[in-house]
């Protein structure tokens, strides 16, 4: 069973429906014991970093996540959930993240130059780094397949963990991977067949 963490942030039922399409057993939960008894964890998230990390901490689920990851359980952070995997975010101030991956989340506006809209919304192609093996999340994908983004901030200073980028005025971090910790800046649950293939690969870890 895969636990989708419910801490008051995120479109959880869309995500659950996507897992249902591929026949995966998932449970939306804020119960620490259910999360501990799960095989894998999903950390979703939309909205502001400060609010989301505060809610996660208030529930005590941040500690549960860190404990389970330390045991080797696979964790997938999606969108804001991915951003919370990092050491800190500079979204309207400086806020501490879970610290599972080194790096910082910063505004994309200075990175992409003039003439491009913020937030970055829509379909964009995945680019796989040449210096590392293709992520296990992309085992069913070819480079250049498109996924759906909605974000104004992106992970930086995390070159060793980057498993894919997307070009939007500059190369922005699209996904990260470090041991049993995975993150996608894009929304697999909004990315059609390509997204379902990514979720299927996560289920098979």
Image (tube, rainbow, N blue to C red):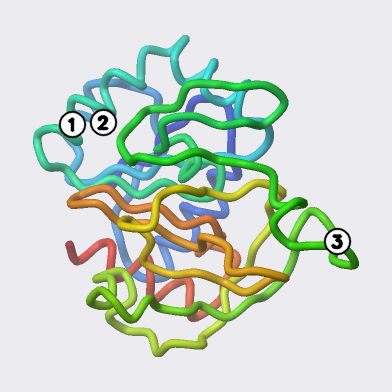
Q: Position of residue 105 (x, y in %)?
A: 55, 40
Residue at coordinates 62% horizontally, 31% vertically from top-left? 90
User: Residue at the spot x=51%, y=85% of the render?
Assistant: 145
Residue mark closest to the camera, 2 vs 1:
1
Q: CA distance from mark 2 to mark 1?
A: 8 Å
Q: Position of residue 1 (x, y in %)?
A: 23, 47
Task: Give the mark, 1 or 3, whose residue is nearer the N terminus.
Answer: 1
Per the rendering, the mark at residue 68 is: 1
- Label 2: few (<14), some (14–19) or many (≥20) C-alpha neighbours in 10 Å: many
- In the image, which disc is placed on residue 35? 2
Are the residues flagged by discs 2 and 1 in contact, CB closer than 8 Å?
yes
Disc 1 secondary structure class = helix
Regarding residue 122, the answer to whether it shows in the image is yes
Q: Secondary structure at mark 3?
A: loop
Which one is closest to the eye, mark 1 or mark 3?
Answer: 3
Q: Position of residue 133 (x, y in %)?
A: 23, 77
The residue depicted at 35 percent of the width and 49 percent of the height is 76
| In-image side of 103 versus 167 (left or right) | left
Q: How many numbered marks are there?
A: 3
- At 38% from the left edge and 61% from the top edge, which residue is drawn? 162
Q: Residue furthest right?
A: 115
Q: Could you say which disc has been placed on residue 87 in the image?
A: none
Q: Residue furthest left?
A: 71
Query: Neighbour class for label 3 at 10 Å: few (<14), some, many (≥20)?
Result: few
Q: Where 99 falls versus 166 (above or below)?
A: above
- Which mark is first along the chain, 2 or 3? 2
Point out residue 84 in the picture as x, y percentages from the top left corner. Answer: 47, 35
Choose the circle earlier in sequence order: 2 or 1. 2
Name the quadrant containing residue 50.
Answer: top right
Q: CA distance from mark 1 to mark 3?
A: 38 Å
Picture quadrant where residue 92 is located: top right
- Determine which residue is flagged by label 3: 117
């Amino acid at each position: 069973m895969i636990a989708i963490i419910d801490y008051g942030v995120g479109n959880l039922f869309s995500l659950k429906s996507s897992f249902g399409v591929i026949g995966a057993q998932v449970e939306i939960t804020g119960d620490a014991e259910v999360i501990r008894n799960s095989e894998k964890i999903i950390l979703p998230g939309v909205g502001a970093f400060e609010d989301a990390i505060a809610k996660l901490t208030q529930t005590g689920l941040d500690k549960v996540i860190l404990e389970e990851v330390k045991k080797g359980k696979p964790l997938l952070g999606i969108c804001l959930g991915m951003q919370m995997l990092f050491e800190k975010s500079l979204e309207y101030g400086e806020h501490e993240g879970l610290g599972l991956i080194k790096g910082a989340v910063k505004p994309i506006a200075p990175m992409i130059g003039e003439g491009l809209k913020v937030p970055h919304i829509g379909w964009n192609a995945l680019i796989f780094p040449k210096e590392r093996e293709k992520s296990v999340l992309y085992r069913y994908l070819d480079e250049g397949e498109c996924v759906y983004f909605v974000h104004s901030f992106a992970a930086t200073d995390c070159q060793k963990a980057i498993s894919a980028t997307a070009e939007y005025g500059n190369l922005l971090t699209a996904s990260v991977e470090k041991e049993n910790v995975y993150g996608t800046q894009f929304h697999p649950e909004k990315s059609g067949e390509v997204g379902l293939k990514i979720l299927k690969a996560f289920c098979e870890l």
